[in-house]
């Protein structure tokens, strides 16, 4: 049964497990278990998908592909895609994302793990889907986040384009991603974002500049310390503090200014907190 296969995979390891799987393939276990895919219970079908993925082999590939294409629920589609990926078959990403977008109740949590696995194994496949421009913004954000979690530097061009997207939520995700995957070559994008009229975009740009240590943008950060929004000033101040002596020197200059301006107050607070730490 499907449950027996799952339990076996938890109890047996190494060569004994491989021998057991070979024996199951010889008796066409995947084909037998696949009959459960037509049963009415969702849990039964999910268990069958997991078990088929464990058994592997040509029969498993056919059964999982059928499940991926025909199963009625999104959870089954994602589970089948995960199982296919587990046996070395990259699922049809366009079809998967189309189903996710068409699902009104939102994507299952397993989708994030699947996208992460794909990003680690084939980041350009994921960035290619991101570059199509046809995806809903919520899906674009999930792809960007998966690339960041996978530290997929090879997909940096797609991330850069996201950081300049028209949709503000996608742009925010892209800018945040640049703070992890980017480098000095992203100064222009982050400087542009730092001067954006949306405070959330400015704050994320400041945080990314600080994380990347982009000293060339210290003047932009200093200007942001005069922004009307507290979060922008705070992130700009902390970013300057991350730029080493040059950034600290800039903070001290700003803190020494006279008057009731918000910039000096923020700089003084950052310096005090840094000293206390």
Image (spheres, helix red, strand yellow):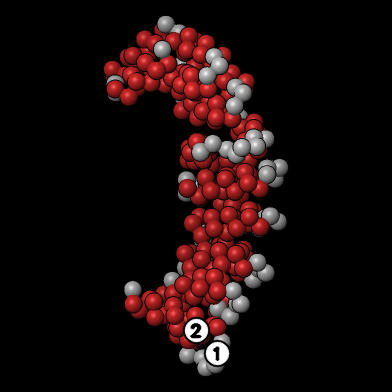
Residue 210 image point, x, y percent? 48, 68
Question: Mark 1: few, some, or many residues within 10 Å (few <14, many ≥20)?
Answer: few
Seen at 66% across and 48% down, the residue is 137
User: Which one is in front, 215 or 165?
Assistant: 165
Are the residues tagged 1 and 2 within 8 Å (C-beta)?
Answer: yes
Give the number of the disc on residue 265.
2
Residue 114 image point, x, y percent? 50, 36
Seen at 62% across and 23% down, the residue is 72
Q: Is residue 73 above or below residue 230?
A: above
Give the number of the disc on residue 97.
none
Q: Quadrant of the N terminus?
A: top left
- Residue at the top extreme, as displayed: 27
Judged from the image, the secondary structure of the residue bearing numbered disc 2 is helix
Give the residue pinned by disc 1: 260
User: Which one is in front, 251 or 37?
Assistant: 37
CA separation in Å, label 1 and label 2:
8 Å
Q: Is residue 244 above or below residue 113?
A: below
Residue 6 image point, x, y percent? 38, 21
Seen at 68% across and 42% down, the residue is 135
Q: Quadrant of residue 56?
A: top left
Q: Quadrant of residue 220?
A: bottom right
Residue 88 visible in the picture: no
Q: Is residue 264 above or below residue 235?
A: below
Residue 177 image point, x, y percent? 54, 55
Question: Mark 2: few, some, or many residues within 10 Å (few <14, many ≥20)?
Answer: some
Q: Quadrant of the C terminus?
A: bottom left
Q: Is residue 113 above or below residue 217?
A: above
Seen at 66% across and 57% down, the residue is 168
């Amino acid at each position: 049964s499907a449950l027996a296969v799952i339990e076996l995979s938890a109890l047996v390891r190494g060569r004994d497990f491989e021998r057991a799987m070979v024996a199951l393939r010889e008796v066409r276990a995947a084909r037998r278990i696949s009959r459960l895919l037509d049963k009415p219970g969702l849990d039964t079908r999910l268990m069958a998908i997991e078990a088929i993925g464990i058994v592997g082999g040509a029969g498993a590939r056919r059964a999982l592909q059928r499940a991926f294409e025909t199963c009625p629920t999104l959870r089954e589609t994602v589970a089948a895609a995960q199982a296919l990926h587990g046996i070395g078959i990259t699922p049809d990403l366009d079809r998967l994302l189309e189903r996710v977008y068409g699902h009104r109740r939102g994507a299952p949590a397993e989708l994030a793990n699947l996208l992460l696995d794909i990003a680690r194994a084939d980041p350009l496949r994921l960035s290619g889907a991101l570059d199509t421009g046809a995806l809903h913004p919520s899906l674009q954000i999930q792809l960007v986040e998966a690339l960041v979690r996978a530290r997929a530097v090879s997909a940096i061009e797609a991330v850069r384009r996201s950081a300049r997207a028209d949709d503000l939520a996608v742009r925010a995700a892209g800018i945040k991603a640049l703070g992890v995957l980017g480098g000095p070559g992203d100064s222009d994008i982050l400087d542009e974002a730092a001067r954006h009229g949306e405070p959330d975009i400015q704050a994320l740009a400041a945080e990314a500049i600080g994380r990347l240590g982009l000293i060339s943008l210290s003047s932009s950060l200093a200007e942001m310390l005069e922004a009307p929004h507290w979060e922008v000033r705070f992130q700009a101040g902390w970013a300057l503090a991350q730029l080493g002596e040059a950034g600290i020197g800039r903070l001290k200059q700003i803190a020494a200014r006279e008057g009731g301006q918000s910039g000096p107050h923020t700089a003084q607070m950052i310096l005090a907190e840094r000293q206390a730490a």
